[in-house]
């Protein structure tokens, strides 16, 4: 057949027979070649700069190059002209609405004898391919985890409404063993993404050193070729589990080619097998996904004598880092100013949380999780509260000034205990005369505050005696006790009576009652 290249092994036999003095006609008959083919190779041998022995010592691809060198494209004058235009063509193709056919027409207008359209596209493609070689990536066991969302969604049916609910499918794989994990979630939000990733790590039984996500907003705030900005919540998640986040480059799926290929396998080995099933809850769907992906991981890989699961359990699982003892909780950040009531208002919860009164007017940093609210000022933790929702106040008494603490602590027990530390008579006065009545205790709080203040300002002996007189006279008012203290003659007169000797002629005040 015209144009068909003869095998170089047969050409070597041709050269050996020619060296032995065999005629061209006999060589052609012996090797089953056309006579003109033999004549052509003998002519090439005679014009070659190398001897037959040297040609026979060459490897077959090199020998073929000596005999079948052809005419390279770069010796063509048209190629030299085309080569100079390549940067222009590549730049123009990036512009909107510009096609190869349009560029070819413009090229022919200036170079009428240039390449036809097929050769024009061929050389253009060859140049683009040569400038973008594909690297061969090697992966270490337990080093990386590729994660992504499948492009196609699944669904389940709400039993109550009959509504079809779409489900996003999270896909992850360890590139060393190609071990796969899938999980259906409601959306691609940060919460759902991290929930699926945490389930993945639990299923694997450990953490890799690096997680490679796509540039979805749940993980990357701003994509950048050199310094992508990672989502703050994703950073907290990574710090909790002890791995680093290295996003794939934008529009470079080859950076995580294995998980892209894994998605294709999931389509054929999971999606296709579940195509005739109807699910009525997300949990039911995920149980089916778990079953099918297990079959996928246990299937022997092509051209290998082991499955993904066998490779993972044998070489990779023990190299993963251990999981933390506690589950991750999403943390939210905000900066607020402490109000005059020494509280901050968390708008997400519509709730007030107290801080020490010394920080009134200060800007504080608030970090809150699902269960806790932590408040920092100047890099120091100043308050921690249990998180609550709904309008209201969560106040710690130690955060209040002394006046406010006293106001909030007011109750009969508080007043009685405080009085016992200062005056026995005052404590009896409060216990039996103020708070042992049918009246609400709040009625006597101001009187108690006044008596405690009077106690602090008065000689203890004088105050104690004034309270005893009030008990004897059964006059329980702040003004009466204050007048006794101010009118010391009443107290002195009582002391004189105490000093008088006892006599049967003195009947005493009890007689007149």
Image (tube, rainbow, N blue to C red):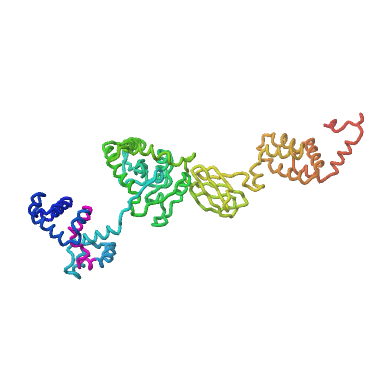
- Marker count (numbered): 0
**Could you say which is closer to the camera, residue 282 or residue 28?**
28
Indicate the position of residue 370 as horizontal and vertical percent values: 49, 43
Q: Quadrant of the C terminus?
A: top right
Farthest residue to the top: give it.
504
Indicate the position of residue 250 as horizontal and vertical percent values: 36, 54
Farthest residue to the bottom: give it.
110
Q: Is residue 504 left or right of residue 261?
A: right
- As for residue 81 lying within the magenta part, the answer is yes
Specify start and end residues of the magenta stretch as a single range.
Answer: 58-82
**Could you say which is closer to the camera, residue 113 or residue 163?**
113
Q: Residue at x 33, y 51 (%)?
A: 136
Q: Residue at x 20, y 54 (%)?
A: 56
Q: Residue at x 82, y 42 (%)?
A: 462
Q: Residue at x 25, y 62 (%)?
A: 97
Farthest residue to the front: give it.
20
| Visible residue check, residue 271 | no
Indicate the position of residue 20 as horizontal and vertical percent values: 13, 53
Indicate the position of residue 470 as horizontal and vertical percent values: 78, 38
Principal secondary structure, stretch drawn in magenta = helix
Residue 455 higher or lower than 51, as above or below: above
- As for residue 165 lying within the magenta part, the answer is no
Residue 204 position by quadrant: top left
Residue 415 position by quadrant: top right
Residue 432 higher or lower than 401, as above or below: above
Q: Is residue 427 left or right of residue 107?
A: right
| Visible residue check, residue 319 | yes
Q: Is residue 488 left or right of residue 138?
A: right
**Could you say which is closer to the camera, residue 29 or residue 219?**
29
């Amino acid at each position: 057949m015209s144009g068909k290249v003869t095998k170089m092994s047969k050409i070597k036999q041709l050269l050996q027979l020619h060296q032995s003095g065999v005629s061209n006609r006999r060589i052609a008959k012996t090797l089953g070649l056309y006579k003109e083919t033999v004549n052509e190779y003998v002519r090439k041998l005679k014009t070659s700069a190398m001897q037959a022995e040297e040609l026979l010592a060459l490897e077959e691809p090199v020998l073929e190059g000596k005999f079948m060198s052809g005419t390279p494209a770069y010796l063509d004058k048209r190629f030299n002209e085309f080569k100079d235009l390549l940067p222009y063509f590549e730049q123009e193709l990036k512009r909107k609405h510009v096609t190869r056919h349009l560029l070819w027409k413009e090229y022919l207008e200036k170079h009428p004898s240039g390449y036809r359209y097929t050769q024009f596209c061929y050389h253009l493609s060859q140049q683009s391919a040569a400038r973008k070689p594909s690297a061969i990536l090697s992966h270490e066991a337990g080093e990386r985890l590729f994660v992504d969302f499948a492009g196609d969604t699944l669904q389940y049916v709400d039993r109550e409404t009959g509504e079809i609910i779409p489900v996003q499918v999270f896909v992850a794989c360890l590139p060393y063993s190609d071990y796969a994990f899938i999980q259906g979630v409601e959306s691609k939000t940060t919460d759902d993404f991290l929930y699926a990733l945490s389930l993945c790590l639990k299923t694997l039984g450990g953490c890799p050193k690096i997680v490679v996500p796509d540039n979805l907003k749940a993980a990357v705030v701003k994509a950048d070729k050199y310094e992508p900005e990672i989502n703050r919540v994703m950073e907290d998640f990574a710090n909790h589990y002890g791995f680093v986040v290295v996003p794939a480059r934008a529009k470079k799926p080859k950076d995580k080619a294995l998980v892209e290929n894994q998605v294709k396998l999931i389509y054929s080995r999971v999606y296709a097998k579940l195509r005739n099933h109807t699910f009525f809850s997300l949990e039911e769907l995920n149980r089916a996904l778990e079953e099918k992906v297990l079959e996928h991981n246990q299937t022997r890989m092509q051209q290998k004598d082991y499955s993904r699961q066998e490779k993972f359990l044998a070489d990779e699982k023990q190299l993963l880092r251990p999981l933390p003892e506690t589950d991750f909780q999403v943390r939210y950040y905000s900066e607020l100013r402490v109000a005059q009531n020494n509280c901050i208002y968390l708008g997400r919860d519509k709730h007030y949380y107290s801080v020490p009164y010394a920080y009134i007017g200060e800007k504080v940093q608030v970090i809150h999780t699902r269960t806790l609210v932590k408040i920092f000022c100047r890099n120091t933790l100043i308050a921690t509260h249990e998180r609550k929702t709904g309008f209201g106040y969560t106040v710690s008494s130690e955060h209040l000034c002394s006046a406010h603490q006293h106001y909030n602590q007011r109750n009969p027990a508080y007043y009685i205990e405080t009085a016992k530390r200062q005056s026995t008579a005052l404590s009896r006065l409060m216990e039996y005369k103020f708070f042992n009545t049918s009246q609400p205790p709040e009625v006597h709080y101001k009187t108690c505050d006044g008596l405690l203040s009077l106690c602090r300002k008065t000689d203890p002996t004088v105050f104690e005696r004034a309270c005893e007189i009030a008990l004897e006279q059964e006059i329980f008012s702040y003004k009466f006790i204050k007048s006794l203290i101010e009118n010391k003659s009443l107290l002195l007169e009582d002391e004189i009576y105490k000093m008088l000797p006892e006599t049967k002629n003195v009947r005493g005040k009890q007689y007149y009652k």
